[in-house]
Image: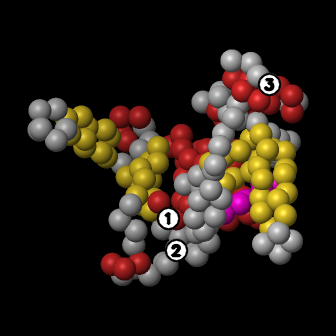
């Protein structure tokens, strides 16, 4: 939804207005420098909290928007390249099933080649059933005249590729070990309820 809304605008003010309507927050981030023992306050148009798949995908989507974007992560960024070993220890059991629409989105972001170079597997059929055994549904790529329905990708591969892509661009400020103390909307800061 957000990528479709942002894509139709050409001016920074239009994107900013759209993001405000999408309940995004514009604000100030304070960072503490251990070297100088002082706080630095920086203005950002968008603060993304969390460097998981969704946060990193949003950061990549906003990368060349002209907005000042910061990505905040409570822990360290996961910068280690996932293993390509085909051993049990080399695989991440947490995976995502990406639709062809998600694949196209990752291709537009320029991230898919890195994922393709690590580990992924296409699927052409899927069976889904509920835990009670009372309902099920089948999907087959042949029904949509496609060789595949999507791809299964390890979550750590997605996170690595998205983080690597955004770090290489340098347009999004990355802050790890960031702990959010308070969030205020612009209306709260202006005294409007």
Residue that label 1 marks: 156
Alpha carbons under labels 1 and 3: distance apart: 41 Å
Residues drawn in magenta:
169-176
Q: Compared to 95, does 145 lie above or below?
A: above
Could you tell me if the residues under marks 1 and 3 are in contact, i.e. CB atoms within 8 Å? no
Residue that label 3 marks: 190
Picture coordinates of residue 152, whole percent (x, y) = 42, 56
Dot 1 or dot 3, earlier in sequence: 1
Alpha carbons under labels 2 and 1: distance apart: 7 Å
| SS type, badge 3 | loop
Picture coordinates of residue 28, whole percent (x, y) = 79, 44
Outermost left residue: 133
Q: What's the residue at 82%, 69% (across, down)?
A: 37
Alpha carbons under labels 3 and 2: distance apart: 46 Å
Q: What's the residue at 69%, 23% (across, down)?
A: 21
Instruction: Give the quadrant of the C terminus.
Output: top right
As for residue 89 lying within the magenta part, the answer is no
Could you tell me if the residues under marks 2 and 1 are in contact, i.e. CB atoms within 8 Å? yes
**Does any portion of residue 112 appear in the rendered image?**
no
| Nearer-the-camera pick, 100 or 92 | 92
Q: Residues within 10 Å of mark 2 (few under 14, many from 20)?
A: some
Picture coordinates of residue 7, whole percent (x, y) = 74, 32
């Amino acid at each position: 939804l957000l990528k479709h809304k942002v894509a139709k605008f050409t001016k920074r003010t239009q994107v900013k207005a759209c993001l405000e309507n999408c309940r995004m927050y514009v604000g100030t981030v304070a960072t503490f420098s251990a070297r100088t023992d002082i706080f630095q306050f920086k203005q950002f148009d968008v603060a993304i909290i969390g460097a998981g798949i969704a946060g990193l995908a949003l950061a990549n989507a906003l990368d060349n928007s002209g907005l000042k974007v910061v990505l905040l992560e409570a822990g360290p960024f996961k910068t280690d390249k996932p293993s390509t070993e085909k051993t049990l220890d080399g695989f991440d059991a947490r995976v995502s099933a990406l639709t062809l629409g998600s694949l196209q989105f990752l291709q537009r972001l320029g991230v898919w080649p890195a994922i393709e170079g690590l580990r992924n597997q296409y699927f052409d059929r899927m069976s889904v059933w509920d835990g009670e055994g009372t309902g099920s549904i089948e999907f087959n790529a042949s029904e949509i005249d496609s060789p595949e329905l999507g791809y299964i990708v390890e979550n750590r591969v997605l996170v690595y590729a998205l983080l690597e892509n955004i770090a290489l661009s340098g347009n999004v400020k990355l802050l790890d070990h960031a702990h959010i103390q308070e969030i205020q909307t612009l209306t709260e800061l202006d005294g409007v309820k």
